[in-house]
Image (cartoon, coloured by chain):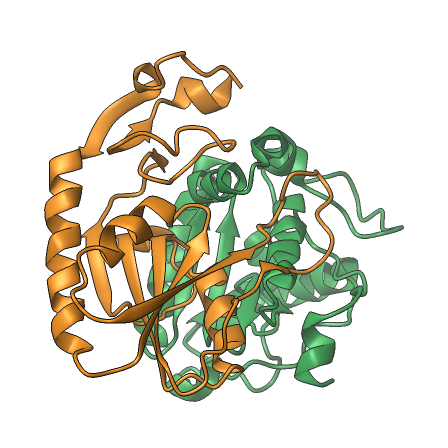
Amino acid sequence: MNVSPDLVSDVAEVLLTEAQIEAKVAELGQQISADYAGRDLTLVSVLKGSLPFMADLMRRVSLPLRIDLMEVSSYGGTSTESSGLVRILKDLSAPIDGRDVLLVEDIIDTGLTLNYLIRYLKGKNPRSIKVCALLDKPARRLVEIPLDYVGFEIPDAFVVGYGLDFGEVYRNLRFVGVLRPEAYES
Amino acid sequence: MTDEDAIIGPRPDHGFAHASEAEFARILDFYQVAWEYEPTVFPILWDLDGNVLESFAPDFYLPDLEIFVELTTLQQRLVRKKNRKVRRLRELYPGLRIKLFYARDFRALMLKYGRAALVSELSGALGQVTSRGETDGPAEPEGRPDDLDRASGPKGDADPIAPDTGAEPGPRHDRRSRAARRRAGRRAAAAAVHAPVT
């Protein structure tokens, strides 16, 4: 993998600027604040991609809330071994039974991870589970799960930045951009 | 077979026609999504006597999600053919949900899972596999011979006016060997070709 030192050179196109993201996150935060007023809200962030989104979103929600973090293994993972099943690498640190859970995701693509997570979290008896995704990429969707809050619908392109990675790199870009094919073909 | 059996543990050889299908099945297994391989053959073209001339068996059915998935990682000519079949399928069975995964989608999926290096060996003619121990003639140079392979259809009960619910999946997978299915398909296709057209 050939990563340019400034990262930005590997980006073919800025899809969402920092300002656009900031404005959208504020808007989502307002909506969530209105919808969950008077309820016991827990924001659950799915590591690692949704970390920046979670950090910004939680500060735009003007309600008492709890946050929690989860991490699930991804297909392929760090090895080339393709057998095995998805695993919870980091589980919730507090019970969610009776609470309203809002799953905070960076991007919904096939929906396979989200489908697994929702099934898993339902087993913990929350009062409700809803989904807030910054990016929705419906082109390859296999599992149709209603997304309750969506920042942006994006085209079918490989995007990085604002938490999204390629080979664990580019997460710290402040915008969302389309990665140059040369960056992942090399 | 219980749902749990369907998604956990080693699977029997499904006789995947293409390595990309085996990889896709592994992804579904990983995320614990139940699947069936080519469980349903949909007739999509009949002659005037009601004999099935052409059928289409989507690669996967995901019963819990009620969606069929067809992978198309072969040559462009075959992609056009698949597109036409999927269009026809949607016309005839409007209640059916089917997702066509093109080579670029599969490539993107591999990229997402950090398996880009596998793309070339899982795509195109390189990814074609034959069933274990079967030597049913030389490998088809242009990929899977869809029309022959799948023309057999649900024999005897091919209903030209199939209801929307005709998409009910059959058994988990067709236990006939690929060669047997291919032979049956050839017989059905030959019969259809020679059937008197009035």
Q: Where B197 sits versus B21, above or below?
A: below
Residue A47 position within the rendered picture, expressed as x and y whole percent measured from the top left: 46, 51
Q: Is residue A173 left or right of residue B130?
A: left
Q: Where B81 sits versus B174, above or below?
A: above
Q: Is residue A150 left or right of residue A44?
A: left
Chain A representation colour: orange
| Towards the viewer: B168 or A96 | A96
* Residue for point 50% across, 72% down: A94
Residue B12 position within the rendered picture, expressed as x and y whole percent measured from the top left: 81, 65
* Residue for point 15% across, 44% down: A22
Q: Where A47 sits versus B177, above or below?
A: above
Residue A35 position within the rendered picture, expressed as x and y whole percent measured from the top left: 16, 76
| Towards the viewer: B179 or B73 | B73
Residue B64 position within the rendered picture, expressed as x and y whole percent measured from the top left: 52, 78
* Residue for point 35% across, 22% down: A180
Specify the quadrant of the image occupied by residue B190. Answer: bottom right
Farthest right residue?
B133
Task: In the picture, one chain is green; tell me its letter.
Answer: B
